Amino acid sequence: MSDHPIVVTGAASGIGAALATLLRRRGVQVIGLDRTATDDTIPCDLSDPHSIQAAIDNLPAQLGGLANV
C-alpha cells in the first residue's frame, strides 16, 4: 500500500483507531497521534501548537530518522 509511514491522528479510539488498525493489517507503518497517550500513540493535542511541535520532535525516534517533514 505505502512504502512510507503514515501519521494517523485520533489513533487511540474511534475512526482514527480503526484506520490505524486497517493500515497496520495491510503492512503500513503507522505513527498514531492522540491526546491520550497509549503504547501505540504519541501524545498530541492538535489544538495546542506546543503539543504538535513536541509530537513532530518525537517522530524521528519513532521512525529511526526522517528524510522530510
Image (tube, helix red, strand yellow):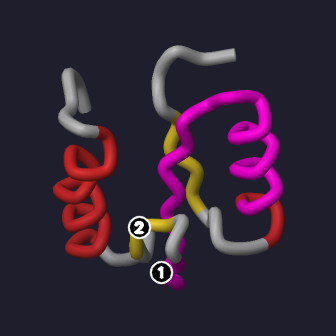
Position of residue 68 relative to residue 14, above or below, is above
The image quadrant where one finds the C terminus is top left
Q: Residue at x 51, y 73 (%)?
A: 39
Q: Which residues are magenta?
A: 17-38
- Label 1's element? loop
Position of residue 17 relative to residue 68, above or below, is below
* Residue 3 percent coordinates (x, y): 52, 15
Q: Inspect the magenta stretch and tell me whether residue 30 lies in it.
A: yes
* Residue 16 percent coordinates (x, y): 72, 59
Q: Residue at x 21, y 31 (%)?
A: 66
* Residue 64 percent coordinates (x, y): 24, 38
Looking at the picture, tell me which residue is in the foreground, 44 or 27: 27
Residue wearing tag 1: 37
Quadrant of residue 26 within the rendered picture: top right
Q: Which mark is residue 42?
A: 2
Ranked by sequence position, the earlier of labels 1 and 2 is: 1
- In the image, taking residue 1 as reference, residue 68 lies left or right, namely left
- Label 2's element? strand
- For the residues marked 1 and 2, what is the alpha-carbon distance in whole angstroms? 6 Å
